[in-house]
Amino acid sequence: MGVDIKGTVVVGDSMQNFSSGLRTYLKGRIAAHVSNTVTFSTEEARVTSDFLNDQECYNLEHQFNQVTLSFAPKEGALYLTDTIPVPVISIGGWDLFRNFARVLPILPEHQVQEGEKWDRERQFPVETSHGSAIGHLYQSFTFDSLVTPDSASLYAAVSWLFSYRIEPVEPDSSGALKKLPLEGNGTGVAQIDLNKKRLKMAHAVFEASSKRGTSAPVIGWNETIHLEYLE
């Protein structure tokens, strides 16, 4: 899995560019005690950043390698399996947890034909450093086509659009939440190996910014997330 992020943030009276990247292996297994759930651990994480020093990058890599995630494909929900906090890079609360969820498609619960669509809308609690909030996620998926890269393989090509918005539970009188990316939207594509019944590749692009309506966002970024199955 690879994640790259590039963006801008207002510091004082000036705009500053920033970038960071993550490369890691995900090792998956069926969860032992929870049906229809896959558990992932991260291995050999590598972090690059133009605003973190070498020791900070090393500390993040160590934290990433301690994280275990559980993913429920049917509901598209992602959970931590223990109490270890998710590693966070200080710009806008960027973390592996959200990136992993963005790059995985939600499959339909009924048979679909080429060109057919399905969607999903979820609300869930979000804890920020400035108080509680509600997350709103909407995704629209399309079964684009069947792909036959060779005579022995059959892939389903899936694409999707998604939007994400955070709604504070209590009014933010301090204005601190305007410094966080409260909304975003993106696109994704994936190939599913129908013969082996596994995700072969997924790729998503996501753009986030501080609250819409401000003349100049305090923070904004673009993410590219790539996930590929390795034999």
Image (cartoon, rainbow, N blue to C red):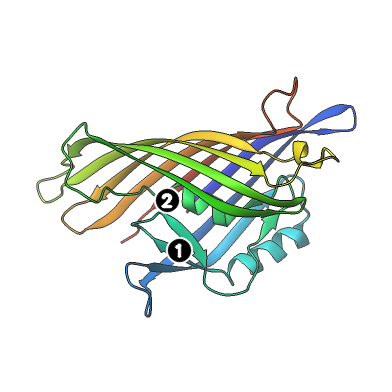
Quadrant housing residue 20: top right
Does dot 1 land on a helix, a strand or a loop? Answer: strand
Residue 89 in the figure: left or right of residue 148: right
Disc 1 marks a residue whose amino acid type is Leu
Q: Where is residue 150 in the image (x, y as percent from the top left)?
A: 14, 45
Q: Residue at x 17, y 39 (%)?
A: 146
Q: Position of residue 228 (x, y in %)?
A: 38, 52
Which residue is identified by label 2? 227
Give the residue furthest to the right: 12
Mark count: 2
Q: Is residue 91 above or below residue 116?
A: below
Quadrant location, the C terminus: bottom left
Left/right of residue 19 with respect to residue 52 in the rendered view: left
Q: Residue lying farthest top?
A: 215
Tell me the residue that label 1 is attached to: 26
Q: Could you tell me the amino acid type at mark 2?
A: Leu
* Distance CA(mark 1)–CA(mark 2): 9 Å
Q: Residue at x 45, y 63 (%)?
A: 26
At label 1, counting other C-alpha atoms closer than 10 Å, the crowd grade (few under 14, some 14-19, many 20 or more) is some
Q: In which quarter of the image is residue 184?
A: top right
Image point (57%, 55%), residue name: 96
Label whose residue precedes the other's in the sequence (1 or 2): 1
Q: Observer-nearest residue: 199 or 181?
A: 181
Q: Residue furthest bottom?
A: 33
In the drawing, does residue 59 fall left or right of residue 117? right
Q: Residue 195: x percent and y percent?
A: 15, 55
Q: What element carries label 2?
A: strand
- Residue 215 in view (yes/no): yes
Q: Residues within 10 Å of mark 2 (few under 14, many from 20)?
A: many
Q: Are marks 1 and 2 in contact (CB under 8 Å)?
A: yes
